[in-house]
Image: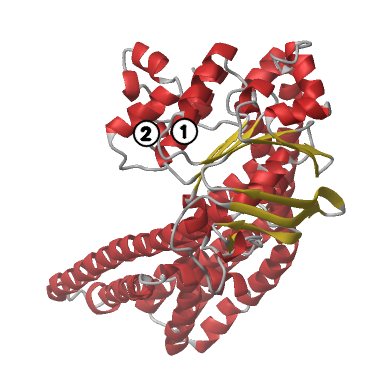
Amino acid sequence: MKNLKWSLQWVRGSRWKMVVSILLCLSSIVFMTAESYVFSYIVDDVLMPQAFEKLPSYLLAALGMTVLYLASTYFYHFLGEQASQAGVYNLKSALFAKLLKQTPDFYADNRTGDLINKCSGDVEMVNHFLNWCIPQWVRAAFMLIFALIVFMSISWQYTLILFAVTPLSGVVGRLMGKKIHPAFKAAREQLSQLNTVVQENISGNRVVKAFVREDYEYKKFQKENEEYKRANIYANSIWLKYGPIIDSLATVISVLNLTVGAVLVVLGNITLGQLTLFLSLAWTLNEPMSMIGMLINDTQRFSASVEKIQELYYSYVDLEDPVNPKQPKEAKGEITFEDVSLKYGNVSVLEHINLHINPGETIGLMGPTGSGKTSLINLITRFTDVSSGSVKLDGVDVRDYILSDLRSRVSLTMQDVFLFSDTVESNIAYGVPDAPMEDVLEAARIADADGFISANPDGYDMIVGERGTGLSGGQKQRISLARALTKKAPVLILDDTTSAVDMETEEFIQEQLRNIPDHATTIIVAQRVSSVMHADKIIILENGKISEMGSHAELMRKKGYYYNTCILQHGLLDDEAS
């Protein structure tokens, strides 16, 4: 009941359609029952006394009931579908909004296949329950109540004999429900595992082929597929164990109906027309009895799906907008780290970082792998929050910004370049969808991407494959850089942006970036000395701490990490060259 109440909240705005749909469903039973009454009267008032002059009026009444039955059935399905689809639309929108709010840590902890399954297969199970199961549950209950009233009005003895079997179906159904719910929940979990394997193999197809692991991945898929098959077979075995019992009880009612009815006609307790009514209304008992197993089956599937959806919907969002946000009057690009430390669990990533970056300044950020470079820049955009201390942008703590406002002030390129399955132009203008074409062209020129884009017959209308398929690593990096430049934010963060391009192209890009009018505050995260040597200030991170800071010349004189890296990359230099 709790899962049902939770699901119905998403049908807001269309609940009247669901209510009308259920009323029409009940009306269809009334019209079908009325048609059965008409046929019973034909037997008693027309056929038995052979008063055939009454037949046309009864047939006309039967035809009218049939038309009303068909019309009510059509519209109850039509409105029910509209209501359930509205609910599914609202639910999917809410789940997607939740996914958009989540931090990178959330996606690191949750399997992609599991998330996709919750937003698709589990939601469709909710749709099936709202659109089909709810009306059928109401229909089954109403048919039993209606049959009880009709049958009692004719013969209470007949009714008691028929309904003596009905409670047994409820007992069997309850036993089945207790056992089948955990079985279906396990099956849904296994489906998520299977989807994850498929998704990983699609995304990592090149890696699989490069390491000749097709057989291994196929066996891994077969293992998960086999587990999914077993989970479904087990769940359905429960249904097969109890389903035939429920169906047999429905058959017993049919046999009792005919046998007892024939005896009562012979004894003169009921008329032949009333027996016809009993027989024609036998479906009001048989249908609920035969469907109850299927409905319990689908209801348990629905409950398992809702629980999976709720796991996502109620998942904790680490970062939220502040209650009382602040916004500086001017976006200058001034960044300050005040005694910043960052921990993931018990692991310390950054310790006591103090750093001031002036507006328009270019900062180079280097250090060994795992020294905390990416973690440091993630604090600026609040992909992660500090454990202690504060990060300020234009004098305001980043935690006091509305997230969308904060991130609109920062333009970012990432190590793991992601391009959408769209045109090159749309990818470059992603952050500014209404950007004029001249801005797109200028950003592409600065990023040295215009050459290879224009060389393609489709130019900027060239469709980029999923995740940038069809482009080289360097080409993807240059489109990613052009995307960041088109945004024209006061802060520009380049996280290993030119690692996949050649030295000549990198030098061209660095030169273009230095000559941009109204230069943004720029942070260049790199492993190459050539990427940061012209920066106003170079910062070296080691073990989460700032170990060196200064210009290229100053760090070369210190002969520390930066000096050693420069020697490794460029060889021993004389004083003038260094």
Q: Residue furthest front?
A: 576
- How far apart in space, not on screen, are marks 1 and 2 (Cα)? 9 Å
Q: Which residue is mark 1?
A: 420
Residue 32 position, x and y percent, is: 33, 70
Assess whether mark 2 and mark 1 are in contact (beta carbons under 8 angstroms): yes
Q: 449 or 27, which lies in front?
A: 449
Q: Is residue 256 visible?
A: no
Q: Kindly give the residue lying farthest to the right in the view shown.
A: 346
Residue 181: image location, x then y, percent: 70, 60
Which type of secondary structure does the marked residue at label 2 adopt? helix
Disc with the residue nearer the chain's start (1 vs 2): 1
Q: Nearer the viewer, mark 1 or mark 2?
A: 2
Considering the numbered disc 1 on the image, is that residue within a helix, a strand or a loop? loop
Q: At 78% across and 22% down in the image, what residue appears?
A: 565
269 vs 17: above or below: below
Residue 360 is left or right of residue 174, and the answer is: left
Q: Position of residue 221 (x, y in %)?
A: 71, 29
Residue type (three-letter) at the residue carrying disc 1? Phe
**Residue depicted at 25% across the width and 65% down the height:** 71
Which residue has dot 2 on it?
426
Query: In the image, is 477 to the left or to the right of 343?
Result: left
Indicate the position of residue 144 as horizontal and vertical percent values: 50, 77
Relative to residue 113, is residue 381 depicted above or below?
Answer: below
At x 69%, y 65%, the residue is: 177
Q: Is residue 391 visible?
A: yes
